[in-house]
Amino acid sequence: MIDIPVTTPRHFLSKKGYDSDKLREKLLFRGILPVIPPRSNRKEYIPYDLQHYKDRNHIERMFNKLKPFSRIATRYDKTKKSFLAFLHLAAVKLWLPSFVSRT
């Protein structure tokens, strides 16, 4: 979609619903560290990096802020350049109120 370098991620952030041994094995085989909290019914506790897991919340909140811009979700723009330009406009609209004095 956008010119992002394709590299192997270092971490896989996910919810408890994706906690399975099979998925963990596949990720570790590819050199990706799973950051998935264990389900409550798991027999043995699998430790995970809580700080990285908290970062997942920031990512979800960012996507939730972009949801009202349906043009981004439905990809009305045909070219990468115009899609990225509208993404920048949406970001400016979201960030601008925090920079403007309200007095």
Image (cartoon, grey):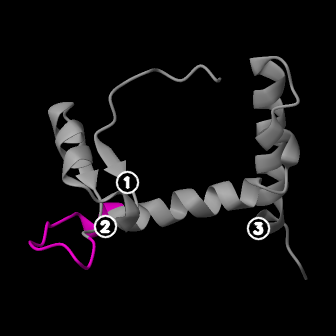
Q: Earlier in the sequence, mark 3 or mark 2?
A: 2
Which residue appears at 14% of the width and 66% of the height? Answer: 46
Image check: 44 left or right of 98? left
Residues under labels 3 and 2: Cα distance?
Answer: 26 Å
Magenta stretch prevailing secondary structure: loop
Regarding mark 2 in the picture, which secondary structure is present there?
A: helix
- Give the residue type that dot 2 points to: Gln
The boundaries of the magenta stretch are 39-52
Residues under labels 1 and 3: Cα distance?
Answer: 28 Å
Which residue appears at 47% of the width and 20% of the height? Answer: 5
As rendered, which of 54 and 103 lies closer to the eye?
54
As rendered, which of 62 and 25 lies closer to the eye?
25
Q: Which residue is mark 2?
A: 51
- Give the residue type that dot 1 points to: Leu
Q: Which residue is mark 1?
A: 13
Q: Quadrant of the N terminus?
A: top right
Quadrant housing residue 45? bottom left
Could you say which disc has been placed on residue 100 in the image? none
- Give the residue type that dot 3 points to: Ser
Regarding mark 1 in the picture, which secondary structure is present there?
A: strand
At which x and y percent is residue 74? 82, 38
Q: Which residue is mark 3?
A: 98
Image check: 29 left or right of 79? left
